[in-house]
Amino acid sequence: YLNIHIQNGKDLDQTTIHINDTQNTPNKEKYGPFPANENLKVRAEGTLDENKLKTNEILIKPTDKKQKINLTFSRKAITKIKDKKNRQKNKIDSMMTDYTHKLNEAYEHSDFNKIKKFFISDSEAAQHLKNMVESDKDSSYTSPTIEKMNSNHDTVRIITKKDDEHGHEIRSQYTLVYDEDSHKYKIKDYTDI
């Protein structure tokens, strides 16, 4: 039997233990039994924000009496991924604050051009907001806070919370796409939830 301990795995979204390329869920104290005359290769794999990470791989020979195995995910790699996500979140948070400020101006002047740059051209979301802004509806919103963020390559889904001019809380879900030309995120889809 092997007693496997994983270090630096708490922050990962998902973790699996691989023994001779057989995947195991890390919810046991001990793994086995294994044939006494067989080499064992042991490693752990995990994901953090769509990034795959692996621990060191340990080879256990039949002559080894090692039963306690320590597998360690790189703290440096985890920190790098978290820092990237924080930079992404800060960039999106700044963009959404700027967007909401310009949205208030757009409603005040019934002028969609004030927020047009935040949208993917000709998207349903852009058309919807154009209709809303140009309908002479008088709306204003506080700066939003991001409650949840999921990213998958160049697409990010966020859920925001803000208040309208009457103090009513509004939660919205946005799909943002990174635009390589402008190096900015653009709104692809939007809905209040």
Image (cartoon, rainbow, N blue to C red):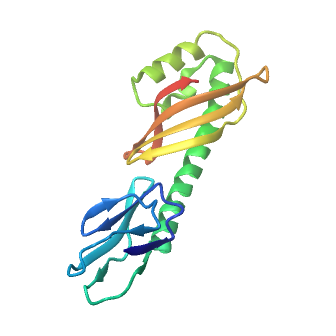
Locate residue 80 relative to residue 66 in the image: left or right. right
Q: Where is residue 16, by image quadrant?
A: bottom left
User: Is 179 rendered above or below residue 127?
Assistant: below
Q: Which residue is drawn at 45% across and 70% down?
A: 77
Residue appearing at x 75%, y 22% in the figure: 168
| Direction left: furthest residue | 37
Q: Position of residue 137 (x, y in %)?
A: 66, 11
Compare residues 45 and 171 and report the one nearer the observer: 45
Q: Which of 158 and 20 is in front in this view?
A: 20
In this view of the protein, which residue sits in the foreground, 16 or 80? Answer: 16
Give x and y (percent) for residue 101.
67, 33
- For image coordinates 26% across by 85% down, the residue present is 61
Picture coordinates of residue 173 (x, y %)? 54, 30
Q: Nearer the viewer, residue 132 or 163?
A: 163
Q: Can residue 145 be seen in this view?
A: yes
Direction top: furthest residue: 135
